[in-house]
Image: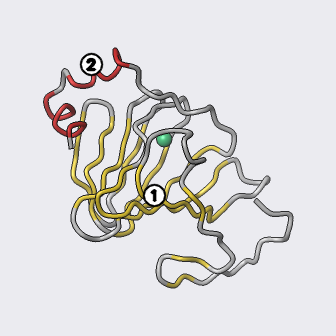
Amino acid sequence: MTDKPIDPFRAFAGFRWDGVTLMPYKEEGAAPFKSVTRQVLFHDPDLKCELRYFEVAPGGHSTLERHEHVHGVMILRGAAEVLVGSEVRPVKAFDLVHIPPLTWHQFRTTGSEPMGFLCMVNAERDRPQLPNDADLAEMRAHPAVAAFLAT
Ligand code: MN
């Protein structure tokens, strides 16, 4: 992110942090998503992981994807429905979500407030895979997943 030394203290206000740039979730057109921003809170060559904060506006969603790397997620604000593998669950602030390797996942904001979450991830990681038609058909075999994907 930056070659400048990291300030040991960076204050929080309004779901922004001092010195942290508000960025688009991904390159536009790289993968389907809607109304998501990204802030990288910790990115340090001496760490093997990164901590990011994502925010998904009402009606928005993250990319439906899978990859070898794992996510450790803590919801910080708002509410969402989350797909992990063949399970769909409602989540709220401070709930934890663990996303294992090569497991389809997606976050969809529910309600009228933005939904924000911390996501811990490997600093070095593989590129996300997107589902093909066969993958989608396999996912839709689970009624809860079919309902989730239809929203
Ligand atoms: Mn992911």
Three-letter amino acid code of the residue under disc 1: Val
Callout 2 crowding tier (Cα within 10 Å): few <14, some 14–19, many ≥20: few
| Residue 37 place in picture, x, y as percent | 50, 61
In the rendered image of this protein, does residue 22 appear above or below residue 25?
below
Which quarter of the rendering shows the N terminus? bottom right
Give the distance between the C-alpha atoms of the residues marked 1 and 2, in whole angstroms: 26 Å
Residue situated in front as seen by the camera: 8 or 125: 125
- Per the image, label 1 sits on a secondary structure element best described as strand
Q: How many marks?
A: 2
In the rendered image of this protein, does residue 134 appear above or below residue 44?
above
Three-letter amino acid code of the residue under disc 2: Ala
User: Which residue is found at the position 21% from the left and 40% from the top?
Assistant: 148
Which badge, 1 or 2, comes first in the chain's sequence? 1
Residue situated in front as seen by the camera: 59 or 70: 59
| Residue 63 place in picture, x, y as percent | 43, 42
User: Which residue is found at the position 35% from the left and 18% from the top?
Assistant: 133
Numbered label attached to residue 139: none
Numbered label attached to residue 137: 2
- Per the image, label 2 sits on a secondary structure element best described as helix
Is residue 22 left or right of 58 when viewed as pictured?
Answer: right
User: Which residue is found at the position 62% from the left and 65% from the top?
Assistant: 41
Residue 5, quarter of picture? bottom right
Is residue 119 left or right of 20 when viewed as pictured?
Answer: left
* Disc 1 CB within 8 Å of nearest ligand 1 atom: no
Residue situated in front as seen by the camera: 113 or 119: 113
Numbered label attached to residue 36: 1
Which quarter of the rendering shows the C terminus? top left
| Residue 84 place in picture, x, y as percent | 33, 37
Is residue 122 left or right of 100 when viewed as pictured?
Answer: right
Outermost residue to the front: 29
How is the protein colored in the picture?
A: secondary structure
| Residue 86 place in picture, x, y as percent | 26, 30
